[in-house]
Image: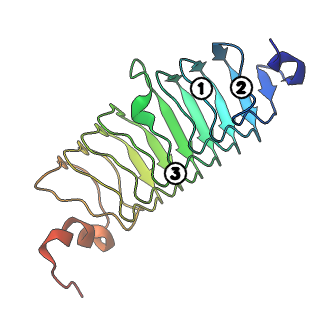
Amino acid sequence: MGEKLVALKSDWNIVFRKDYSVANSLTEREYESCTFRNCDFSGADLSNKSFIDCVFENCNLSMTSVKNVSLKTVKFLSCKLLGLNFSDCNPFLLSMTFENSLMNLTSFYKLKLKGTKFKNCELQEADFTDADLTLSLFDNCNFERAIFEGSNLEKSDFRTSFHYSIDPTVNRIKKAKFSRDGLAGLLDKYDIIIE
């Protein structure tokens, strides 16, 4: 109940603004239609919490523990999510959107993320091994040294993204969209020169 004292009521939800890093923590188990704005969760433990129709805006969730966390229709806007292991989340009804976020070293290992939108995100060294990203949109994202292995990328859109290295022999890419400039990222394993 402690958060409600620092929350600001808006027309449709409760807005939280607080430092929830390591020493402080969220006390409620479930949060619905809440906005977390300018909150610091770095290194915090959010295990077993549930977030439904929530927005995290300009928050730092780097190295946060998300074991069995439910993220149902959750938006991350201008957030710092360094080293976050989304594969620890509860996969049931998992649904997220990411915009303008720093997501280096994040893991989406074996997650079903069909139709997920990533816009203007830094995904350097992110792990998408065995993830299902069918119909996902990657708009202007940096995938430098990101890992795609056994990933289902069918019908996904990479046309405006860059620095990806995706091996078509170990990933499913049927009907995925790539720009002509990005085709080199599909041929990296052949060590050829494209001019």
- Residue under the point 72% across and 40% down: 40
User: As displayed, is residue 179 above or below residue 90?
Assistant: below
Q: Which residue is mark 2?
A: 25
2 left or right, relative to 121: right
Amino acid type of the residue that numbered disc 3 sits on in the rendered structure: Met
Point out residue 168 in the picture as x, y percentages from the top left corner.
15, 56
Using a 10 Å C-alpha cutoff, classify the residue at mark 1 as few (fewer than 14 neighbours), some (14 to 19) or many (20 or more). many
- Residue under the point 64% across and 26% down: 54
Q: Which residue is mark 3?
A: 103
Using a 10 Å C-alpha cutoff, classify the residue at mark 3 as few (fewer than 14 neighbours), some (14 to 19) or many (20 or more). many
**As rendered, which of 133 and 91 lies closer to the eye?**
91
Residue 165 visible, this angle: yes
Amino acid type of the residue that numbered disc 1 sits on in the rendered structure: Leu
- Residue under the point 72% across and 16% down: 27
- The single residue placed furthest to the front in the displayed view is 23
Of the 4 image quadrants, the one containing the N terminus is top right
* N-terminal label among 1 and 2: 2
Q: Which residue is mark 1?
A: 46
* N-terminal label among 3 and 1: 1
37 left or right, relative to 80: right
Amino acid type of the residue that numbered disc 2 sits on in the rendered structure: Ser
- The single residue placed furthest to the bottom in the displayed view is 195
**As rendered, which of 145 and 167 lies closer to the eye?**
145
Q: What element does badge 2 sit on?
A: loop
* Contact check, label 1 and label 2, Cβ < 8 Å: yes
Using a 10 Å C-alpha cutoff, classify the residue at mark 2 as few (fewer than 14 neighbours), some (14 to 19) or many (20 or more). some
Separation (CA) of disc 1 from disc 2: 8 Å
Point out residue 67 in the picture as x, y percentages from the top left corner.
48, 26
Point out residue 20 in the picture as x, y percentages from the top left corner.
74, 33
